[in-house]
Amino acid sequence: MEKSTETQLKYEADESMRLDHFLVEKNPDYSRSRLLQFIQEGRVQVDGKVASKGGLKLAAGQLITLSIPEDKPSVLVPEAIPLDILYEDDQVIVINKPAGMVVHPSFGHSTGTLVHAVLAHCDDLKSFGGEIRPGVVHRLDRDTSGVILMAKNEKAHVFLQKQFKSRDIDKRYLALVDGKPPTPTGRIEAPIGRDPVRRQRMAILSDDKGRHSVTEYFTRETFPKHTLIEANLLTGRTHQIRVHMAFLKCPIVGDVLYGYKKQSIPLGRHFLHAWKISIRLPGQNEPSVFEAPLPPELEAALAELRIK
């Protein structure tokens, strides 16, 4: 039999309010989508009657009953894959992800993901983030290495995701690009959306079809045919840095999707690394900073360029 915790709340305001807005206000440890899921599953009652929709208008004096199910173990099979752990406590785990590892299961990647590895390391991780994405707060592309955070419980998951959504974080990448950007430092504001022709790609679109996307970049080191940049994401779109740098005619080295088919440096991956992130952890008033050093193959590529 399913275990659940029942919470009763009384709506006491004079003005009417939507049920879903009220639940979000009173349950900050749960995301709006999770609370809407509870409504859809019939876990919310208003004056003893099951609520049918989140837009239901509440009136003063009504009693709202919320039945919260106990988190279930993930259905995925843990895999004992070694992890480079930068930090861990009972709320979160911060990992230096290697290139070539997919973050969570998807079409064509049913095993060997970061989630499978974390499930083996944290045997009490539940499926609160979705059955195939337990604990996933944000993602990195398969061939992007570096810092990634995962939550161990729903409260931590919501706390961290809110900062990503509001951009109350500082996340820096290091990238080696072909050529030289038009200016040593710059700000790229160009809407990104799904490429209408090649659906596996993202593309720069018009304002009414793409999502607002902003990337800042800073030159760290220059070479005759390449530039090492630091990128700061002010929005978090899929493939954002890769698309924006290709837009400047300076694609990331090794990026066969947005860059050159004939690679200028034989890497076997693209040169994009999530170097540093500054974010508040649950229970903290000030942000913590986590850094992942460049992996050996990227350091070797830079060392080769410096002696040419």
Image (tube, rainbow, N blue to C red):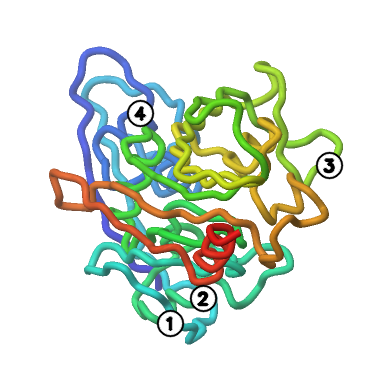
- Mark 1 residue crowding within 10 angstroms, few (<14) / some (14–19) / many (20+): some
The reply to whether dot 3 and dot 2 touch (C-beta < 8 Å) is no
Res. 2 mark: none
The reply to whether dot 2 and dot 1 touch (C-beta < 8 Å) is yes
**Which numbered disc flags the more N-terminal residue, 2 or 4?**
4
How far is disc 3 from disc 2 in space, using C-alphas? 30 Å
How far is disc 1 from disc 3 in space, using C-alphas? 36 Å
Q: Where residue 26 sits: x, y (%)? A: 24, 37
Q: Name the residue under label 1.
A: 120
The reply to whether dot 2 and dot 4 touch (C-beta < 8 Å) is no
**Which numbered disc flags the more N-terminal residue, 1 or 3?**
1
Residue 237 in view (yes/no):
yes
**Which numbered disc flags the more N-terminal residue, 3 or 4?**
4
Going by the numbered disc 1, the residue's amino acid type is: Ala
Residue at x 47% of width, y 31% of height: 216
How far is disc 2 from disc 1 in space, using C-alphas? 7 Å
Res. 21 mark: 4
Q: In this view, does 86 lie to the left or right of 288?
A: right
How far is disc 3 from disc 4 in space, using C-alphas? 38 Å
How far is disc 2 from disc 4 in space, using C-alphas? 35 Å
